Image (cartoon, rainbow, N blue to C red):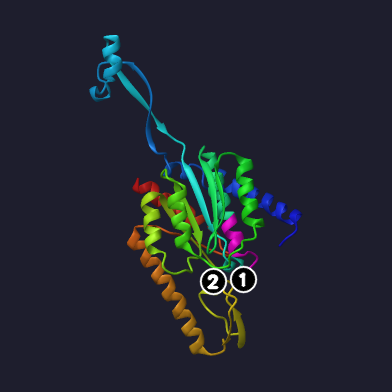
Amino acid sequence: MAATSEILKKVREIELVTRRLVTTALAGQYHAVFKGRGMSFDSVREYQPGDDVRMIDWNVTARTGEPFIKTFVEERELTVIIAVDMSASGELGTVDQSKRELAAEIAAVLAFSAIKNNDRVGLVMFTDRIERYIPPKKGRSHVLRVILELLEFEPEGHGTDIEVACTYLTNIQRRRSVVFLLSDFIADDYERALGIAGRRHDLVPMVIEDKSELALPDLGLVALEDAETGEIMWLDTGSRNVRKTYKNTAEAQIAARDTSFRKLGLEPISATVGESYLAALTAYFRRRAARQ
């Protein structure tokens, strides 16, 4: 684990980068997509010719003897929950950044976008269990706490259980919220729970990937350790058949994951370690805004 001073430095770096992105590249896009829960009652006023008669407040009209109508305002405030997979596989990173650090940076972008929109932000960290829950709040200091937690927190679990995370999200947040689920989705048997959470909330899967997970380099005989189980396996990466089998297995997992997303009507956003995620985020926001 990095020293506290190093982590705080990293938090400040992430804040500078992500706030600049939110202010420039993503300005207005988040607002256009996530517009609040609907309309809420504001006040009453005297009826004027041309007003919708369906908006007449009959109680006030009866009491005053004059027609009054109800007025409404848009409920802007949303609750945004960022759920982050903190399993051991997140430590993987073949460039200058791990999947966990990439997830923290993307979470910061989403969190700063939310508070700029006057929304509340909460955090769920999970592995094969729920590790920590930070209730939704507003403000810069709260977002900085979220980033710090993501970088500093040492989880107890090592595996990934997306079903546990989805069930928790369904139960802990009764009111419909926007949920960004950040994970590599290397897990089993989560489709049903993901579907339930997707019906309860506005669920956006964010797939955090590293290219090394998709193909083995030719390095000869190497020992590979499963970060989540600790199991060590010796592989002859010099063998073309071994590399092909590994690639086919990885592609099959990706295909199964994407099939589940399509079946559930979920549109994922993909981010790869070492590559810019800005294009994927802006493209998602634009597609969704166009549909609305």
> Residue 211 bears which disc, if any?
2
Q: Residues within 10 Å of mark 2 (few under 14, many from 20)?
A: few
Question: Residue 223's spot in the image, x, y percent?
Answer: 62, 83
The answer to whether marks 1 and 2 mark residues whose Cβ atoms lie closer than 8 Å is yes
Secondary structure category for the residue under label 2:
helix
Question: Seen in the image, is 182 located left or right of residue 50?
Answer: right
Image quarter of the C terminus: top left
Question: Seen in the image, is 20 located left or right of residue 243?
Answer: right
Mark 1 = which residue? Answer: 94
Question: Residue 173's spot in the image, x, y percent?
Answer: 45, 46
The answer to whether residue 24 is visible is no
- 277 or 71: which is nearer to us? 71
Residue drawn at point x = 23 percent, y = 22 percent: 53
Secondary structure category for the residue under label 1:
loop
> Residue 265 bears which disc, if any?
none
Image quarter of the N terminus: bottom right
Q: CA distance from mark 1 to mark 2?
A: 8 Å
Type of amino acid under label 2: Lys
Image: 289 above or below 102: above
Type of amino acid under label 1: Thr
Residue drawn at point x = 52 percent, y = 51 percent: 82
Question: Residue 265's spot in the image, x, y percent?
Answer: 34, 57
Residue 97 lies in the magenta-colored region: yes
Image: 47 above or below 72: above
- 291 or 2: which is nearer to us? 2
The answer to whether residue 49 is visible is yes
Magenta span of residues: 94-104
Residue drawn at point x = 38 percent, y = 30 percent: 40
Residue 78 lies in the magenta-colored region: no
